[in-house]
Amino acid sequence: MKKKLFLFLFILINLAIFEGILSLFDPERILVKGFDKELLFRMYPKKSGMVVSEEYSVLVNTNEHGFRQNTSSSENYSTLVIGDSFTEGWGVEEKEIYTEIFNQSSKNEKLRNLGLHGSSPILFALQIKYYLEEFKPKRVIIQLFDNDLDDNDKIEVFTELNEDGTVRHPKSRLAANIFGESVYNFFKERTLYRLTTKVYKFLKKQPSPILYYKVGREPSITVLSHKDSISKFGGLKSLGDEINTKYGNQFGFYKDTNEELWKSRLKKNEIYLNQILKICKDKNVELSLLYIPAKEYFAKGGITGNVNEYSKEAHKKSNPHFLQIEKVCKDNALKCYFANEYFFDKEPERLYFPYDAHLNAEGHKALAEMIGRE
């Protein structure tokens, strides 16, 4: 027994030493809590990291709630904006995010930014009760994007659903139940564990990028101008035959709407939107939806290349995701914001990063203008 105990301690000590050495060379900053028994996942409060690519180099700071916004105790943030990486402000400075631009020009209503990359309606439906209790807003804006249908399925495997398809709570994890949530997350965030995971995904030919870098440890990259980025990566064009392969087929519903996969995903998405609506109604909170399309939506011929007429109406009719959101808004008399309509006549190519496909600073400015006008 003593030998076994000694061997166990010997292995444990050596793993700790190896972990310490590896961590010295580890450039990654973990900003997202891997598992939260109430919210599934969320960003850690009061942390910093760098987001870097050939199109941007941006510092990300999280506040006391784990979101990317420097709030003031003297302001009344009466509206919550719950969204994905577009609302988090992926690739732009904090002051350039549309919520911040709006707040700078608004004397009364202020927007509280609750953007978290990778989010979608199933996660919003799971988390919104918590946020309504935490912040007690008068109004909620749910920001939606064209990859929501795909992201819902990715998140669904980590959740428990009710019989009617609505989301109930995060699926429990055995290791987190045995060792506790903090120990579970601590282990998963160790450099040795993440390195092993990256090697496994590499062998399986699965992407495993570093999202956030430690400040000062980010790769040295010359950031391209918008013009140079277009020259390198190409201008706005339809996906055409690539629609089922590029971006992991996240936008395949434009082409394959009648396939069972996309019919099922659209149906589930509507269930989550209606669940959000019911929760807001029960709490007497006004709900709005804010829709942002994939940048290729604005290409000549639309995202598939098969739209014959270049017009707002023709492109809208080709987008079943938008039509679903528009119907939810009309059926429930919601005040909604449609960037696909507002951006159409504003040279949309200049509003997105050419390669990354998120909104750039100009895109966030246009989004703030749209919300301010409407």
Image (cartoon, helix red, strand yellow):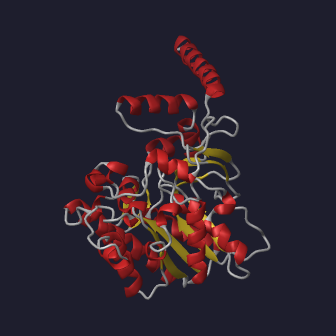
Q: Quadrant of residue 327?
A: bottom left
Q: Position of residue 135 (x, y in %)?
A: 64, 72
Pick whichever, 295 or 182, lies toward us. Answer: 295
Residue found 67% across the figure and 59% down from its top = 94
Q: Which quadrant, please, contains the C terminus?
A: bottom right
The outermost residue toward the left is 259
- Tell how many labels: 0
The outermost residue toward the bottom is 333
The outermost residue toward the right is 74
Q: In the figure, is residue 229 to the left or right of 256? A: right
Q: Is residue 75 something one can see in this rendering? A: yes
Does 292 sit above or below residue 59?
below
Does 5 sit above or below residue 216?
above
Q: Position of residue 73 (x, y in %)?
A: 78, 70
Does 362 sit above or below residue 138?
above
Residue found 41% across the figure and 86% down from its top = 332
Q: Is residue 164 something one can see in this rendering? A: no
Residue found 29% across the figure and 64% down from its top = 254
Q: Quadrant of residue 174?
A: top left
Pick whichever, 343 or 260, lies toward us. Answer: 343
Q: Position of residue 353 (x, y in %)?
A: 51, 55
Does 373 sit above or below residue 58?
below
Q: Position of residue 331 (x, y in %)?
A: 37, 86
Residue found 60% across the figure and 76% down from its top = 369
